[in-house]
Amino acid sequence: MPVKQVINKGRVPIKIYTDQIEHGALNQLINIAQLPIIHHHVAAMPDVHAGIGATVGSVIPTAGAIIPAAVGVDIGCGMNAVRLTLKAADLPDDLRRLRGAVEKAVPVGFNHHDKPTVQRKSVNQLGAGLDRIIGRHPGIAKMQKPHVWARQLGTLGGGNHFIELCLDENQAVWVMLHSGSRGIGNVIGRYFISLARKDAQRHQLHLPDRDLAYFQEGAEHFDDYVHAVEWAQDYALANRREMMRLVVEALRPLLPPFQVSKEAINCHHNYVARETHFGQDLFLTRKGAIAAARDQLGIIPGSMGTRSYIVRGKGNAESFCSCSHGAGRTMSRSEAKRRFSRSDLEAQTRGVECRKDRGVLDEIPGAYKDIDRVMADQTDLVDIVHTLKQVLCVKG
């Protein structure tokens, strides 16, 4: 579908790909559109909803500046999916052993590995980059225990992060996972968000929301933030790559011999990149959105009880060559816990081997938008390549 709404209440228009948007998210978008650094327009994807710092499901083009709170604290959060040379018939009837093997191989929540599982060379390269960042900003080192970042490589985290075993429309088996830059990305994000707020106050920037404080090119901390955010995005890619390796190796002893036949993509959906749009070189922040350039593959997950999609981008200029990053929440985590019960969770995840306790109640499918409606709203942005349905889900 084309753009459904155009809102003109800021310096630039807001182009929205859905008619489902709550008041809080719309106000956040209007605040963003008022900033002098925004170029051409702001785009809101079909899964748009209110976020912390900036609207989730927004694409924000900034000229010569970056808004750290728009990038957020889970820098580089995103998806990875691979197809295996297995079919549904190759899976056991009872998937509990498979879930146990994955949970044993990949620490979840606040847990981490006892020691790094990646090659020492990779750890050393990442460590050298982080040392340069900390050398200029020693406050970052005070916010997390030393070297925890190395043991968190290949770990899931909590919240909406997950690992799934899925079947596609041809009954082929896929492994799909969702995670980001873990504790170190959170530390870097919080540190520079705070620094941007302090700079804005010192320079008496008039902002519609203090979370929209930004660093401009040439300013004292701009280059340092760019270096730090690019490092965290690289870390997130490495984290997903290592986690996928651990999951695949954990499954091998419990399944018939198989190979990894295809990697769909290892893509960010909370990040900033240098791109050119509408005739200008920009910093493009995708806050809960993925790149969807022409023929570019991406992953759009549903909730833990619904379908997910492998998609191919159409390169739609109005969306800044972007699309949604998932279904998008319809309610807060606390509201989901109030509104739903454990029996609701069991009913909505029937047929999926997963946790069904109150600890994951905030992730119940009913707390999310209808993924099929989200997909219907972005037919101008992507084509569906594969439709996946999970049979196993590991949550933090």
Image (cartoon, rainbow, N blue to C red):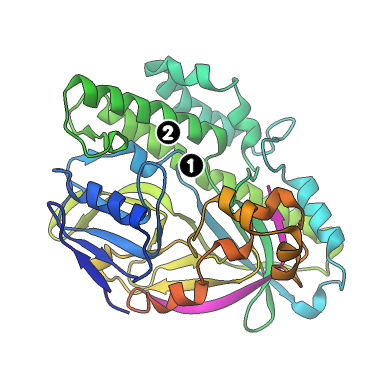
Specify start and end residues of the magenta stretch as a single range: 382-396
**The N terminus lies in which quarter of the figure?**
bottom left
**Relative to 276, does residue 154 appear above or below in the rendering?**
above
Residue receiving disc 2:
189
Query: For the point 63% across and 36% down, which residue is it?
Result: 152
Q: Position of residue 12 (x, y in %)?
A: 14, 55
Judge by depth and name the residue closer to the eye, 20 or 266: 20
Q: Position of residue 202 (x, y in %)?
A: 21, 19
Tag 2 and tag 1, C-beta contact below 8 Å = yes
- Residue 391 within the magenta-colored segment of the rendering: yes
Instruction: Say what amino acid the circle numbered 2 marks.
Output: Gly
- Residue 224 seen from this side: yes
Eyeballing the image, is 391 above or below 48? below
For this orientation, the residue located farthest to the front is 338
Query: Outermost residue toward the bottom?
Result: 170
Mark pair 2, 1: CA separation: 7 Å
* Image vertical order of residue 146 relative to residue 105, above or below: above
Task: Please name the residue that numbered disc 1 is placed on.
Answer: 74
Residue drawn at (51%, 72%), measured in percent from left and top? 370
First of labels 2, 1 by sequence position: 1
Front residue of 173/69: it is 69
Query: Would residue 58 be visible to someone looking at this image?
Result: no
